[in-house]
Image (cartoon, helix red, strand yellow):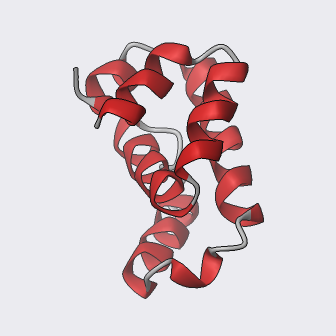
Amino acid sequence: MAIKEVVSNFSLEQKEKIGTIVIDIILKSKKGAELCSSDARKLIRLWQEDLLFTDDGLVFLLGVAKKLEPEKTIEKLSSKGFSELAKVLEEG
């Protein structure tokens, strides 16, 4: 199952919770310097346009978090009750 399919099944409240978890991982990552400028610009644009918690915004955030902190992202999502999403991230 694709990440976007799983994300689309969550309520807005759940999407906001997932987004907050993932944003924290990205912002606290010691690998932040590895974030390419185009991803950084897209992150800022999504934030400015209030699109971070949309399906596409979450798919993007999850992809960035997985690039920077794959184990931490999967572990944190699982521990917060999003094990199905964590499993799809781990497989993909």
Judge from the rendering whether residue 89 lies leftward or rightward of residue 74; answer left or right.
left
Considering depth in this image, is 46 or 77 the residue closer to the camera? 77
Looking at the picture, does residue 67 appear above or below residue 71? below
Q: Quadrant of residue 18?
A: top right
Q: Residue at x 40, y 34 (%)?
A: 89
Say which of 63 and 92 sits in front: 92
Q: Where is residue 70 shown, x and y percent of the image?
A: 52, 49
For the point 65% across and 45% down, which residue is it? 72
41 sits to left or right of 19: left
> In the image, residue 35 lies at what x, y percent?
50, 77
Picture quarter with the C terminus: top left
Residue at image location 53% in from the left, 54% down from the top: 65
Query: In the rendered image of this protein, does residue 7 appear above or below residue 27?
Result: above
In this orientation, does residue 15 appear?
yes
74 in relation to 42, above or below: above
> Which image quarter is the N terminus in?
top left
Query: Where is residue 2 shown, x and y percent of the image?
Result: 23, 28
> Residue at the left extreme?
1
Q: Is residue 11 visible?
A: no
In terms of depth relative to the viewer, which is nearer, 59 or 55? 59
On the image, the x and y values in percent for residue 20 come to 70, 41
Q: How many numbered circles are shown? A: 0
